[in-house]
Image (cartoon, rainbow, N blue to C red):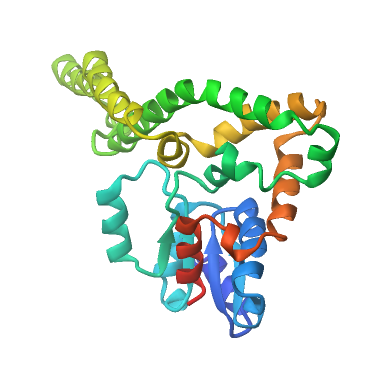
Amino acid sequence: MTDPHDWIKNLANDTLGKILIVVEGEDDKAMLEALFGIVKPGWRFKFALAPVGGKKRVYQACKDALGSNWRGLVDCDEWGEDRVHRESATTPNVKILPRFTAENFWINPDELFELIPAHYWKNFPDARVKIKTDIESALPDWVAHGVMWKIMLKRQSGFGDLKFPNELMERPVTDETQIRDILTRWHNYLDPNAILDEYRRELEAAQRLTQNEQYSQVVHGKRFFHQVITLTLNRAFHTLNRTHEDWTKDLTATTKRLDVTQIPPDLLSTLNALLA
């Protein structure tokens, strides 16, 4: 039988005595390689980077005995302040991005403009106004989406405590009263009125935030980048066949040429903590 920790052992064997920094995915690795080169040009002499396939595996690796001196970086996702503080206290060698996802650093027009390759601006010098207008017009709907996404993800994680759907699948349950009690518990958990009340409260709070805070903390950056930023840039620069992967490569390449003073302060603080 395969040891469930074999993948961690393989990571340990590949580090060659360096401090390993584990991240969720390949895009995270590419972005960090570009940023580390700015913050600490000789970082590869001391550190190695490896994507491990998700937040859960980042924590598994950094909590394992083999990874006791490793470091990790994960997206904030739906976690609120309390959860971030709790996780940071429990596993201090895993740093949590100060924004919803890594892509949230690419969706605020004022930050995005610095990363778009110069040749696009050369051919379309007036595109900035249109790009910013299109992104800002999409923002309110995506603030609402981000609020609902967090609410539903919390509900989804709570299904484990409710034993959904296993309570009616693991063994025979034939008593209809018991079946009704189980179904009622699940029904109450997804009560539309309760969810809509929470949604209205959270949306009202999100709408009071500044645009910068909405781009950073509320909008699901990965989905917004795929569905809004990619289409907006393609329309503005007449590059209709470019995918979000194409734009990711472009923005990552441009990131390598940034000056350290151009890195957003909240991101710079996280990078310095990882490389300390």
Please tell me which residue lies in front, 150 or 58.
150
Residue at image coords 39%, 35%: 210
Residue 248 on image: x %, y %:
70, 45
Q: Classify residue 107 as left or right of residue 89.
A: right
Residue 69 on image: x %, y %:
45, 79
Residue at image coords 61%, 74%: 40
Please tell me which residue lies in front, 178 or 138.
138
150 is higher (above) or lower (below) than 51: above
Regarding residue 107, the answer to whether it shows in the image is no
124 is higher (above) or lower (below) than 134: below
Q: How many marks?
A: 0
146 is higher (above) or lower (below) than 20: above
Residue 95 on image: x %, y %:
42, 62
Q: Quadrant of residue 188?
A: top left
231 is higher (above) or lower (below) than 106: above
Regarding residue 176, the answer to whether it shows in the image is yes
Please tell me which residue lies in front, 83 or 265.
265
Residue at image coords 75%, 34%: 243
Q: Quadrant of residue 33?
A: bottom right
Name of the residue lying farthest toward the bottom: 17
Q: Classify residue 28 as left or right of residue 90.
A: right
Residue at image coords 74%, 48%: 249
